[in-house]
Amino acid sequence: MLFNRDKIILDLCGGTGLWSKPYKEAGYDVRLITLPEQDVTDYIPPKNIWGILAAPPCTMFSLARTRAKLPRDFVEGMIPVNACIRIAVTSKPKFFALENPIGLLSKFLGKWQYDFHPWWFGDPWTKRTALWGWFNKPKRKYNIIEDVMTREQIERCKNNNRKLPSISDFTGSTQSAKRAITPQGFAKAFFQANQ
């Protein structure tokens, strides 16, 4: 692990730091750049960045935004997205991945390089998520949802008029906080593919 201590990983808009957790556990120099401590929009990165993980807020781009009182503000929503891209382009890391749920961000960034559901990596919920940037694609662990979830879990969700379970079926906390959790199976698979 000592050989990783000089490799800087930036976790931009990382919230709890769950995406970068496998890097931290492997001894990388992980720097969590997230509000309220640090704002990605005025962050100046150090030299020699090894990798960048970016998870800018999806509020303005989410297809789940159906009950918001204020209209979408794409200009406001793109501010942290553009900041993450600026940091990546100027830092030139070995890998850069910007994640956001499948939604309207593709109207601004184009087609994503990779998409996944958490259950593909053993986390028992659905949330189709896209990644943009340059990185090695993580290897999918499961191809059949029944290998990850019990029949009862799937049936309970079907009875609630949902085709597949979402993270809200398995965790507490607010809906938006639940939706923002980085699936740990995915985080580990991404780490294994991008070291």
Image (tube, rainbow, N blue to C red):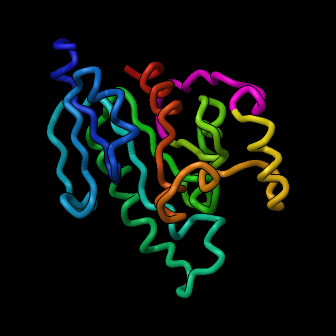
For the C terminus, give its image quadrant: top left
Residue 117 in which image quadrant: top right
**The one of 124 and 151 positioned closer to us in this rendering:** 151
Residue 177 placement, left or right of 165: left
Residue 133 in the image: state x and y as whole percent. 48, 39
Q: Is residue 157 above or below residue 186?
A: below
Evaluate whether residue 148 shows in this view.
Answer: yes
Q: Classify residue 50 as left or right of residue 95.
A: left
Where residue 170 appears, as percent x and y from the top left, is 59, 49
Residue 32 rendering spot, x and y as whole percentages? 25, 45
Identify the residue shown where x is 71% and y is 49%. 165
- Residue closer to the observer: 4 or 110: 4
State yes or no: residue 147 in magenta.
yes
Give above or below for 99 relative to 176: above
Q: Is residue 115 visible?
A: no
Q: Which residue is drawn at 51% across and 68% down?
A: 59
In percent of the image, x 59 and y 64: which residue is there? 62
Question: Is residue 135 one of those drawn in magenta?
Answer: yes
Name the magenta segment's main secondary structure: loop
Chain part drawn in magenta: 133-148
Where's residue 188, x and y in %?
A: 46, 26
106 left or right of 154?
left
Rendered position, 166 above or below 120: below
Is 116 situated left or right of 193 in this image? right
Front-most of 21 and 47?
21
